[in-house]
Image (spheres, rainbow, N blue to C red):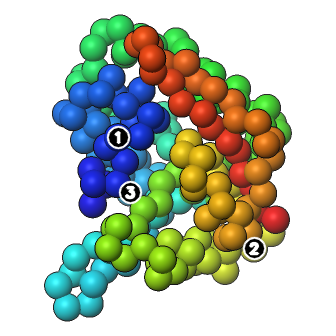
Amino acid sequence: MVKDESATDDFARTLTGGKTEAYHHLNRSVVVSGFLSGEVYVVEEATKGKVLASAIWFPPNRELYEDTEKGKAVKPLMASLSSELDEWWCTRFLPEYAAFSENEFGEGVKKEAWHLQWIGTRKSHRGRGLAAMLIDVIRDKKGDAKMCLEVEIPENLVFYQRCGFETLNEEAHYFEGCHEKSGFPVWAMMSK
């Protein structure tokens, strides 16, 4: 399901150098991290068990690629990258993304919130409320905690706004990639 949905977006292409193998390792790293440190939600077709939609959330005080599980989740991804891209991840992307989160959400806010790391619905099942349902699952259980997310695809902003999220800054932060003509915009969003 994942490969069909975002194989051509600037975010994935920048993080993987456009390599298909690295792209699969990127997706796998997020899923593994979700199972180890977060919560993974899946909507399946009742008769065939085919995944129609899924979401990966990190509850308060948990996060993607936590130190305790980093090797299991990230090691195959990093091994699939060129040395130049590996260095970019470690020295530019990850530190810049952490700073972006602190600046946009506020110090420690993302860590204290429910963070939506990934969500997707098969194209054939979009517009049926499945992704919104996967957001409402957390909205119903979060208590006083906030929900937050980052958006790399401008067209997705409207969906999240309809789901009750507000863009914290109308102007996107732009991450420069490692390679020429690579990079992507990011917006931070918080639940109302």
Q: In x, y percent, where is residue 71? A: 34, 32
Contact between labelled residues 2 and 1, with CB atoms less than 8 Å apart? no
Q: Residue shown at 54%/46% (left/top)?
A: 153
Give the quarter of the image for residue 34.
bottom left
Quadrant of the drawing holding the N terminus: bottom left
Contact between labelled residues 3 and 1, with CB atoms less than 8 Å apart? no
Q: Residue shown at 48%/77% (left/top)?
A: 127
Question: Which of labels 1 and 2 is toward the front?
Answer: 1
Quadrant of the drawing holding the C terminus: bottom right
Q: Amino acid at mark 1?
A: Thr
Q: Element under label 2?
A: loop
Contact between labelled residues 2 and 3, with CB atoms less than 8 Å apart? no
Q: CA distance from mark 1 to mark 2?
A: 37 Å
Q: CA distance from mark 1 to mark 3?
A: 25 Å
Q: Which is more N-terminal, label 3 or label 1?
A: 1
Q: Residues within 10 Å of mark 3 (few under 14, many from 20)?
A: some
Residue sitting nearer the eye, 113 or 125: 125
Q: CA distance from mark 3 to mark 2?
A: 22 Å
Residue sitting nearer the eye, 88 or 128: 128
Residue linked to disc 2: 143
Residue linked to disc 3: 35
Give the quarter of the image for residue 136.
bottom right
Q: Amino acid at mark 3?
A: Phe
Q: Which is more N-terminal, label 2 or label 3?
A: 3
- Judged left or right of residue 85, residue 169 is right
Q: Is residue 93 visible?
A: no
Q: Residues within 10 Å of mark 1 (few under 14, many from 20)?
A: few
Q: Is residue 114 visible?
A: yes
